[in-house]
Image (spheres, rainbow, N blue to C red):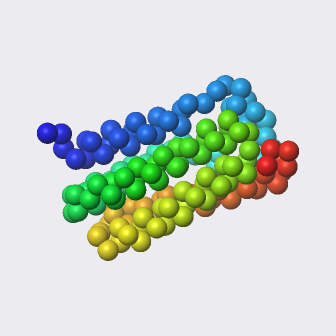
């Protein structure tokens, strides 16, 4: 039998691959959008998401080892799918509003999970903090881009 950390890591990686289902024409569209002047950290976003996914998987591993709860694992997966859906939804619909909605939904789901996990493991809940900090920043950035690009909101 495979160790749980490996299964969780592989599932996390496979779900994360979903964010790469992007068409070049959509990426071109996104790159043409105006950005807020304060958006100086755009090149760091892939690293930030890598950290978020690693911490989320680690949190899931801790929770699994303590509970063996498939429902919680499904909830972790749902949040990751929501995170990964942001880019395809935003790009395929060419709507910053849709991206803002998906980002906000992911944050609410993440917050709910963190409160559930807190009673199981403080460490697992703390490992969700990178997402709970980054998600509103990314969502707010998308919303601000919508104000600069009203035709795409």
- Tell which residue pokes out farthest to the bottom in this image: 119
- Is residue 119 found left or right of 17 in the rendered image? left
Kindly identify the residue that appears in the image at 34 percent across and 59 percent down: 72
Kindly identify the residue that appears in the image at 65 percent across and 55 percent down: 101
Residue 126 position (above or below residue 60): below
Give the total of numbered labels: 0
Look at the image and tell me in which quarter the N terminus lies.
top left
Residue 122 is drawn in which quadrant? Answer: bottom left
Kindly identify the residue that appears in the image at 21 percent across and 63 percent down: 66
Residue 13 position (above or below residue 25): below
- Tell which residue pokes out farthest to the front in this image: 71
Kindly identify the residue that appears in the image at 64 percent across and 27 percent down: 23
Where does the image place residue 74, in percent across and percent down from the top left? 37, 52
Q: Can residue 112 be seen?
A: yes
Residue 67 is drawn in which quadrant? Answer: bottom left
Where does the image place residue 50, in percent across and percent down from the top left? 46, 45
- Tell which residue pokes out farthest to the top in this image: 24
Where does the image place residue 11, in percent across and percent down from the top left? 35, 41
């Amino acid at each position: 039998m495979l160790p749980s950390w490996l299964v969780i890591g592989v599932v996390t990686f496979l779900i994360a691959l979903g964010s790469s289902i992007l068409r070049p024409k959509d990426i071109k569209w996104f790159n043409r959008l105006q950005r807020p002047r304060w958006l100086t950290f755009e090149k760091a976003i892939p690293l930030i998401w890598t950290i978020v996914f690693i911490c989320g998987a680690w949190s899931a591993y801790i929770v699994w080892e303590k509970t063996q709860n498939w429902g919680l694992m499904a909830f972790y997966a749902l949040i990751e799918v929501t995170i990964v859906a942001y880019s395809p939804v935003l790009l395929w619909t060419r709507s910053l509003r849709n991206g803002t909605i998906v980002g906000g939904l992911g944050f609410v789901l993440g917050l709910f999970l963190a409160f559930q996990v807190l009673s199981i493991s403080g460490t697992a809940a703390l490992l969700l903090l990178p997402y709970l900090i980054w998600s509103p920043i990314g969502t707010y950035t998308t919303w601000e881009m919508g104000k600069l690009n009203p035709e795409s909101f």
